[in-house]
Image (spheres, helix red, strand yellow):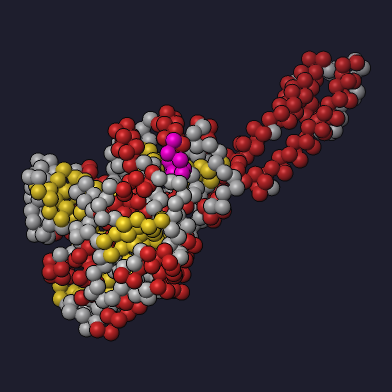
Amino acid sequence: MGQTTPAGRRARRSRQLRRHYSVWRLFRANLYDLALLARESSTVLVGFALVALIGTLYFHFFYRPRLDLHLALYQAVKLLLFASEEKLPADLPGQALFFAAPLLGLALLAQGALNFGRLILDKSNRRDAWQVALASTYRRHVIVCGLGHVGLRVVTLLLEAGSDVVVIERDAASEFISRALHLKVPVVIGDAREPATLGQAGLKYARAIVADVNNDLLNIEIALAARAGQPGIKTILRIFSEELDRNLERSFGLNTVFSVPALAAATLAAAAVSHQIDYVLTLDDNADLLGVSHLTIQAGSEFAGPLWKFEEGEGVRVLAYENAAGRAGQPLAAQELKAGDRLVVLGSLDALETLSLKVLSGDQMGALSTGRGGQPGQRLDHVVVCGLGKVGYRVVQRLYGLHPRPQITVIHVDDGEISFSKQIRGLEGVRRIIGDARDIETLQKAAVHQATTIAAVTSDDLVNLQIGLAARRAHPHLHLVLRVFSDTLAEKLGELFHISTTYSTSELAGSTLAAAAILGGVSQAFFVGNRLLASDGYVVRAGARLVGKRVQAIRDEEQALVIALRREGRLMTLPPLEMVVAAEDELTLLGGLDALGRLRGG
């Protein structure tokens, strides 16, 4: 939980992921492959068996002296192998058999051995068949359809969460296939809408399927095909349109359809008005935001004493704790805070912003400006959003819904895509500028010298970096928020240019898709260290195990944190730890997938 960029921490975690196929899995895959090879050689085998049968019948019924059936079979095989010691018969059919059988046997055996040996030894030319063989050994796995930026991230996160994965990818030339194979994930090449392809990926035995192609209609077709092949399978769909998202959930179930840009936009918007945000959870119909942040208690900061007192005093909840030696402590409430302790904290944006300043000593105050952009204590209330695509317009909408609302300026190119412009046209006070945000003159039109934040959220990593560097030249203390696809690039940006607030939309959305595939029904999810946490709605029924329990007891005993509680229509965010849960309370819980699964069962 070191002080690196959010995406940098995720990149390091992904690089630590090392996987190997078990000996038992490889043995089973080879058996399947041998059976497949036998089917491919069926013509040769059938031909050999037919000639042996004819020879057996001849030796048993027509040859003199007549042979018993088992001896007739033995002599027929020897005849095929040029090893027969029997005399040449006098009858013409027998003579024809004695001349033709060895020649046919030699030809069939040679051809069969050649084909079989070539196929079994040269797996590089049979990669597709070998991947199908490996996929046949999986049970209770997740099938991921589509191996783009988001798909690969979902695969990685599923592996980190301990789930087995099989991939279906239509493009055999995809650049991401080699990366999936390096992770020891079988990749089946084919169209995921086809029952045969789904069958090769083990649909019959899968626990869930993630339709993650960058095409809404294709994802719907994949989900329908999967449901037809296995009616009870969990289907997780990646959909761009939020309206389509809501409509599809009526058919596929609550929290089964997700918009990647919508999942990412809240975090990008929150990062634009906060100095230190890793991830954001949305509550109360997406109006309230809870941020997740990494903090290190510095020498000279004001915090000391019990962790529970820190939580109640600052209005936050600690999700993970490590002391200076890197050891985690449980239960959390019993820990004593001191210099060097590292925390993952959940709280409102205002609470986290205040807390990020309190934990710093005087020596670190200046570093906040240099390392993250913005002046210590400065309110980030003037945001320039660069890019108005699938993600950009949603970031603008999120910023517009914040209280207090920042001043918002949007820079975007006039590329003929007017649909996204329409989405923000009715937002009063949002200023729009047509132009290239990499151009200093365009930035000056946007009053960059008066802005506190530049959020570069176009779909091009290089363009976003160029925007960030151009903005820094015009205004050295700007707070930068960059959208990138590559976690490795995000880490390098922090090292080279001191740009620490870099986010990958595929990473921000991938955790939720992975958690939904494993558990189902979750609304959002994110990683804390190597632990996947998800949020889940829970209505407390009379007689349920949570009735009468304090919020702190639920945290300690059930390993689930109550992050919101609605009682008689009133929503309480981060309710007091001493509050007692009553029947008919509506809870939003945050916890590991195992813990949430147990609570659903009780």
When asked about the image quadrant of residue 37, the answer is top right
Question: Is residue 328 at least partly visible in the picture?
Answer: no
Q: Quadrant of the C terminus?
A: top left
Residue 212 is a magenta residue: yes
Place of residue 158 in the rendered image (x, y in percent of width and height, measured from the top left): 41, 51
- Is 21 drawn above or below residue 480 in the view shown? above
Place of residue 93 in the rendered image (x, y in percent of width and height, measured from the top left): 87, 16
Q: Quadrant of the N terminus?
A: bottom left
| Horizontal relation, residue 590 to residue 194: left or right | left
Residue 199 is a magenta residue: no
For the point 82% across and 15% down, which residue is it?
A: 62
- Is 580 drawn above or below residue 320 in the view shown? above
Q: Which residues are magenta?
A: 210-217
Place of residue 509 in the rendered image (x, y in percent of width and height, measured from the top left): 37, 52
For the point 35% across and 68% down, which residue is it?
A: 448
Place of residue 143 in the rendered image (x, y in percent of width and height, measured from the top left): 45, 42
Question: Is residue 303 at least partly visible in the picture?
Answer: yes
For the point 48% across and 38% down, which residue is it?
A: 202
- Is 565 drawn above or below residue 336 in the view shown? above
| Horizontal relation, residue 48 to residue 576: left or right | right
- Is 557 drawn above or below residue 343 in the view shown? above
Count of residue discs: 0
